[in-house]
Amino acid sequence: MVSTIKERALLSKLGGIPLQPDSLSWLLTPKALKAELLSRIAGATHSIYIAALYLEDDEAGREILAALIEAKNQNPQLDVKVLVDFHRARRGLIGHKGDSGNYFMYRKVIEAAEHPIDILGVPVKSREFMGVLHLKGFVIDDSVIFSGASLNNIYLHQDDKYRFDRYHVIESAELARSMREMIQHYLVNDVAVTSLTQPKETERLPAKTEITSLKHRLAKAEYKFQETRIGNRVTPLMGLGRKKNKLNKVIVAMVEESKDSLFICTPYFNPPYILVRALTKHLRKGKKIDIVVGDKTSNDFYIPPEEEFSTIGALPYMYEQSLRKFAKRQQWAIENGQLNIHLWKDGRNSFHLKGISADSHRHLITGSNLNPRAWALDLENGLLLQDESECWKEQFEQEQQHILEHTERLYHYSQIETLQSYPAPVRKLMKRIKRLKADFLLRRIL
């Protein structure tokens, strides 16, 4: 993806849906997200479309599902559709033996429902490790609640632990219509997208050829809307694969077209080469970057040394070494204050924030992890907010301060641990991975 003069002017020419200053609001906490979701679901009048990686069979997941069923009972004409990743719904949690998969819960609940709702599984690829449905958005009537969160206890802070994310509410009938119609056209009506509530006796699963065909159609999918190129606006974006991926191109353009500063959030640091190159060039031009990344202990897959180690537990350490490598190369920028790396840690809670802000007036809210997997394998989306009048500047700055509340700034790359300081099982596995030269491949698919 070579940058051209035309692409460097991409953002200013990018059409979007006009937004009024009061059309955007922030929720800030996972409990606020849960309360907003339940309130909006209960008050829905014509449609509820939910896209998430998964809706879990736990207390919070069942509460959301019960709310959807109750809303449908109160208004049988309500159009309710829940879309989750097909493969993720049909397996148990990683490391949890005997777990039967969330679709068993869906089937049981829908069988007992007076007015069933649609719960659909989207097989982006034939295997989960090759790519998943990573679309985000809770589209309820004429509003969109956008977050990287899925629906379960930890994302909604049901118990003691939480997974920190970003949560925005956008009031826009046109945006809601655009996101709803994309789901209808490319997903709901596709033969490869199947109900996850089918009776076992008559269950029909998608054929491999149908999944392959769906993948090609999704690579060309886009949101359609009545657009403007002036004023405050929001542009819905999506992408699958490396070729013609508009979301990826916009992310690179945000870095290349930034005149002063970037504020980047990512759960772990493993960016594609083209993004690393753009960030490095940004720094070489004397501009500033703030990166907020989760400490390895706030990674979803972190296993404390006192607990039994499993292979998946090496991931946080691999990501940490990627961050150390980047920080070492850019130590000069850290020392002169151009590059600020903030490590997020809050007890045993986890960090799941994604997105980029450029020059305080362009903001991408997304579920994309800004890593090779997201850029090549998963079906991703995001919303680009262009704040021409800077009416949202103060609120975004307040959100950033909220994000930084549990962070520690990195002053030298040596503050990040080396392989030699890791627990013995981690060292052994990572040395083996490096010896087999498998680390490059793993970073592309995990």
Image (cartoon, grey):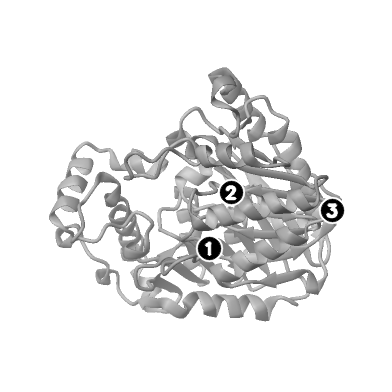
User: Mark 3 Cα within 10 Å, few/some/many (few <14, many 20+)?
Assistant: some
Image coordinates of residue 417 in percent, x first then y, are 23, 65
Q: Are marks 1 and 3 in contact (CB under 8 Å)?
A: no
In three-dimensional space, the C-alpha distance between marks 1 and 3, rounded to whole angstroms, equals 34 Å
Residue 35 visible: yes
The residue depicted at 56 percent of the width and 70 percent of the height is 31
138 left or right, relative to 89: right
In three-dimensional space, the C-alpha distance between marks 3 and 2, rounded to whole angstroms, equals 26 Å
Image coordinates of residue 388 in percent, x first then y, are 76, 70
The residue depicted at 65 percent of the width and 34 percent of the height is 218
Q: Which residue is mark 2?
A: 52
In three-dimensional space, the C-alpha distance between marks 2 and 1, rounded to whole angstroms, equals 13 Å
Q: Which residue is mark 3?
A: 227
Mark identifier at residue 156: 1
Of badges 2 and 1, nearer the viewer stands: 1
* Amino acid marked by disc 2: Ala
Which comes sooner in the sequence, label 2 or label 1? 2
Which image quadrant for residue 24? bottom right
Image coordinates of residue 88 in percent, x first then y, are 48, 39
* Amino acid marked by disc 1: Leu
Residue 407 drawn above or below residue 166: below
Which image quadrant for residue 436? top left
Residue 31 drawn above or below residue 4: below
Which comes sooner in the sequence, label 3 or label 2? 2
Image coordinates of residue 321 in percent, x first then y, are 29, 57
Along the line of sight, which residue is nearer the eye, 126 or 3? 126
For the N terminus, the image quarter is top right
